Amino acid sequence: MKWVDRVVGPILCIALQPWRVLSRRFGRRGCAGSEVREILVIKFWGMGSIVLATPLLAAIRRNYPGARVTVLTFSSNVPIFRAFGIGNRFYDLTIRGPVRFLFQFVRMVWFLRRGRFDLVFDLEFFTRFTAILAFIAGGQRSVGYEATHFWKGNFYGRSAHFNLYRHIVDNFNELGRTAGIEVGKGGLDPMPIPSDVAGKVAALLREAGLDDRRFVVLNPNAGPLALERRWPAGRFVELARRIRDEGGLDVVLVGAPDEEEYVRGIHGEIGRERVHNLAGRLSVPELAALLARSAALVSSDSGPLHLATAMRVPTVSLFGPETPVLYGPRGEGHEILFRNLPCSPCMNVYNAKTVICPYEVRCIREIGAQEVHERLLRVLARETAVRSLVAVGSESP
């Protein structure tokens, strides 16, 4: 997909320039706020990015309460959009080979042309594919990111600047401000947990003997966009044993269905005593409910890390090829480990999040299990102190 965007994307952008010029001259102009009835949000890649975009998406809903919001995304992302209450309808794609994708693309273009969208937000940073879709759907009524050295066809009606030195939440909010939307400065809102989801997670914890015991969640995975972000499996094995044997806490392993086999291998190396594997068994809302009941999360740079941050869960996060300046958890109760080697971070939005490392990803491999465990103990001590203060406060007259 990266290769297609890099090689085929510029050709399509050039081919569509006459349409773009004519659209600028004769196309439908942007609508005033009171006239916005149909909004399209385009966001394909990254569960974590979707979580980090929720302040912007909530601001869109606040500014246009009467508008219908359509979300264009991959099928696997629909549950997280629904869980956060984002979107009135969804047009989702499933990538299953080039022929099927071409058929889906033709249908999608037909859908976008018929949509008559008053406002289009392209939340992808630098993909020509989504810029073309935004143009097809909205023309001059579209908003997206531009950079002088990364040509995307000048397809957006309004362009926002992406700043590599500002947190990703701030970059998303800048997209909203470019569209004239009032965006607040608050943090991430927690995902609402329905009672049936909370009940299912409570039953799973009872089954594992964890309904009245503290546990730490470990996420040994990183999204397929850059697997190099994963902390080595052997380090997770060592860390889990330290948590169990030295800290006396239970450990819960999590992961998506396509990560289940990888996590199962780690589980087998740790041993099964007081270590529980829920990889592949939880939906996104169920994962959020599990995190909300945990003492802390240890994770590589990935979606569950940002979900835990939204759920107000203390975290220890491990960064290597990516920078915590953009993606590190904000606020109290978080510990970030980042070696900041001369060669890192090396992946960013300008190189399509591609890691080309001649040093065998030393930046993530050199983070030791003992160091992570010490940071975790620090996080747990703070969490215990906060809980004690809350308990004392609740008992005061």
Image (cartoon, rainbow, N blue to C red):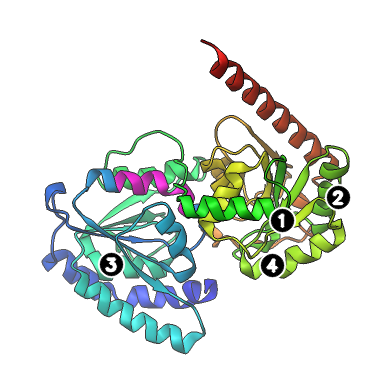
Q: Amino acid at mark 1?
A: Pro
The amino acid at mark 2 is Glu
Report helix, strand or loop for mark 3.
helix
Identify the amino acid type marked 4.
Answer: Glu
Asked whether the viewer can see residue 302, the reply is no
What's the residue type where badge 3 is placed?
Answer: Phe
Residue to which mark 2 is pinned: 238
Which residue is denoted by mark 3 in the rendering? 135
Rendered position, 212 above or below 96: above
Say whether disc 2 or disc 3 marks the residue closer to the N-terminus.
3
Marks 4 and 3 sit apart, C-alpha to C-alpha, by 38 Å
Label 4: how many residues lie within 10 Å, few (<14), some (14-19) or many (20+)? some
Q: Position of residue 247 (x, y in %)?
A: 83, 37
Horizontal side of residue 122 vs 313, given as left or right: left
What is the distance, in whole Å, between disc 2 and disc 3 at their CAs? 50 Å
User: x, y percentage for residue 299?
Assistant: 68, 49
Given residues 236 and 151, the one toward you in this image is 236
The Cα atoms of the two marked residues, 1 and 4, are separated by: 11 Å
Quadrant in which residue 133 is drawn: bottom left
Left or right: residue 322 compared with residue 90: right
Q: The residue tagged with tag 2: helix, strand or loop?
A: helix
- Residue where numbered disc 4 is placed: 260
- Specify which label sits upstream in the sequence, 1 or 2: 1
User: At 51% from the left edge and 10% from the top edge, which residue is drawn?
Assistant: 397
Horizontal arrangement in the rendering, residue 300 relative to residue 186 (left or right):
right
For label 1, the residue is 220
Callout 4: helix, strand or loop? Answer: helix
Q: Nearer the viewer, mark 4 or mark 2?
A: 4
The mark closer to the camera, 4 or 3, is 4
Measured along the vertical axis of the image, is residue 192 above or below residue 98?
A: above
The percent coordinates of residue 228 (x first, y second) are 70, 60
